[in-house]
Image (cartoon, rainbow, N blue to C red):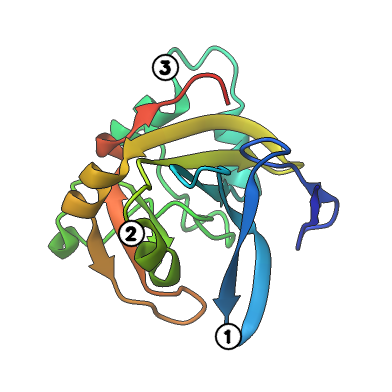
Amino acid sequence: MRFQASRGGAKPRMLGASAREVPLTINGQRKMGIYEESMKGDLVARRVELPEWLGEKALEKGAGKPFLARLVAGEIRHPHASIAESQGHIFLEPDPELGFGGPAVGIDLEIWERIRRPGAKELLFAVYAPGYRRVATWRIPVAEFLEKARLVEGKGPFMAQRMVALSELKAAAGF
């Protein structure tokens, strides 16, 4: 099953046809297509949608390094003056006081409660450029995420999340 995207078109499944959709409540509305979990509940996936400008960086040919490595190395920065578009679902330039040491990604607090239960073993971040082209899949064991995640309070449209530095993630193959 595919879900209608806010940007138009259908959202592809992150974990395949056998995965379960995990609903999320945002501003009193139930949203679908952001999180999925495997039938066994051991794998939870979070959709990371990139804005146009960052999607272009992710799809650059001949960059020499994988997208995750370029982000962690600080080679991709938000061009504040030349573009009004957001950072998408990646917190590219978190306040140094948060202690990430670079870009971070996270999960909503409602999902945090879900992965804290026994059985959840791995958290995946499925990264999509505009047009729902998957450009990367990153993973982290749930136990490690629970240990290293920091609370980032919400402001404006940004909801509070538990986040980890991208440097804590590994590339995932086979998704």
The amino acid sitting under disc 1 is Asn
Q: Nearer the viewer, mark 2 or mark 3?
A: 2
Residue at (47, 50) in percent of width and height: 79
Precedes in sequence: disc 2 or disc 3: 3
Outermost residue to the right: 9
Query: Which image quadrant: the C terminus?
Result: top right
Q: Residues within 10 Å of mark 2 (few under 14, many from 20)?
A: few
For the residues labelled 1 and 3, the Cα–Cα distance comes to: 38 Å
The amino acid sitting under disc 2 is Arg
Residue at (44, 64) in percent of width and height: 111
Question: What residue would you read off at disc 3?
Answer: 65
Residue 8, percent across and down?
A: 84, 57
* Rendered image quadrant of residue 53: top right
Q: Nearer the viewer, mark 1 or mark 2?
A: 2
Residue at (46, 73) in percent of width and height: 158
Question: What residue would you read off at disc 1?
Answer: 27
- In this picture, is 173 found above or below 49? above
Residue 102 at least partly seen: no
